[in-house]
Amino acid sequence: MQILDGKALSKKIEEQVTADSKKLKQETGRVPGLAVILVGNDPASQAYVGMKKKACDRAHFYSVTHEMPEDISQDAIEKTIEMMNDNPNIDGILIQLPLPSQIDTTRLLELVAPNKDVDGFHPYNVGRLTTGLDGFVPCTPLGVMRLLEEYDIDVQGKNAVVVGASNIVGKPMASLLLNANATVEVTHIYTDDLKKHTLNADIVLVGAGVIDLITKDMVKKGAVIIDIGINRASNGKLVGDVDFENVAPKSSYITPVPGGVGPMTIAMLLSNTLKAAQSHA
Ligand code: NAD
């Protein structure tokens, strides 16, 4: 069994992004810029935005966070997005999700200029991903593919079972795997007998947000296990969706939580923002 070390790889990627960004500045005078919209006081959202800001600082990117109160109007957020769309110093716009219930999230995601959509959530980029065209790909599944690549884990012809079918994790994960010629099954909360599906998988990729959803009896020996979940256990520790202790010995490769997919997500955000800046230069 080998641990897929997302922490080490993300550091390597960050160093490359920082070097490429320096080169871009030397050649064009352009510094990659990221704008983040953060609404309300959700501690998890605040923590994620804090991590993204720190990563931008490490890579010498320009970044700005628009903090808005919980009761902000749709109109006010839309105006901010439009302003960022028009701001030449901003290459990437990120709306930290989830948003309060009075806000129409879909409308906001569709308002972000597709060439600044570094989260890859705009339907334009979703369409490009599903048709296998270049565009912005959501950071978490992109980070998973990069991690598999780094460890020479070829997904072509493999049975990949994705657990969780959200727009930001499961669905783009499935598209990327399909584009890489895996045989893909997508499972979710309504899937009958999850174990029947995961037992057949060469690669299990789980992002459901349920502690210990994947147990050792649900995976075949030698499977690759990618744990995308991030949950707070009752003892306060961060854990994934996989019963790591018991599943790890049965796997060929496995991601830890923390230190697996999480840091890769941040590294891919920097990488997407640099890509946007390069295209705007
Ligand atoms: P979500 O709630 O939008 O979607 C969860 C998905 O899991 C749904 O499709 C649901 O049907 C499925 N699901 C829920 N319970 C299930 C069960 N018992 N069996 C099978 N499927 C089940 O959540 P999300 O935003 O996609 O996030 C999923 C998890 O990934 C969360 O733990 C989140 O914190 C984590 N996450 C991690 C990163 C990262 O950087 N590592 C990034 C985004 C999300």
Image (spheres, rainbow, N blue to C red):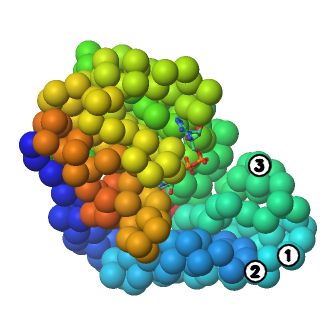
On residue 68, the disc is 2
* Left or right of 72 on screen, residue 246: left
Of the residues shown, which amino acid type is indicated by label 1? Ile
Identify whether 254 is placed above or below 84: above
SS at badge 2: strand
- Given residues 203 and 7, the one toward you in this image is 203
Residue 244 placement (x, y as % from top left): 26, 50
Of the residues shown, which amino acid type is indicated by label 3? Thr
* Left or right of 66 on screen, residue 18: left
Picture residue at 31% right of the left edge, 48% below the top: 243
Picture residue at 56% right of the left edge, 24% below the top: 191
- Residue on which disc 1 sits: 72
Residue 85 placement (x, y as % from top left): 69, 64
Quadrant of the image occupied by residue 8: bottom left
SS at badge 1: loop
Of the residues shown, which amino acid type is indicated by label 2? Met
Can residue 11 be seen here? The reply is yes
Picture residue at 40% right of the left edge, 18% below the top: 196
- Given residues 209 and 217, the one toward you in this image is 217
Q: Are marks 1 and 2 in contact (CB under 8 Å)?
A: yes
- Residue on which disc 3 sits: 106
On residue 43, the disc is none
SS at badge 3: helix
Determine crowd level at label 1: few under 14, some 14-19, many 20+ residues with C-alpha closer than 10 A.
Answer: some
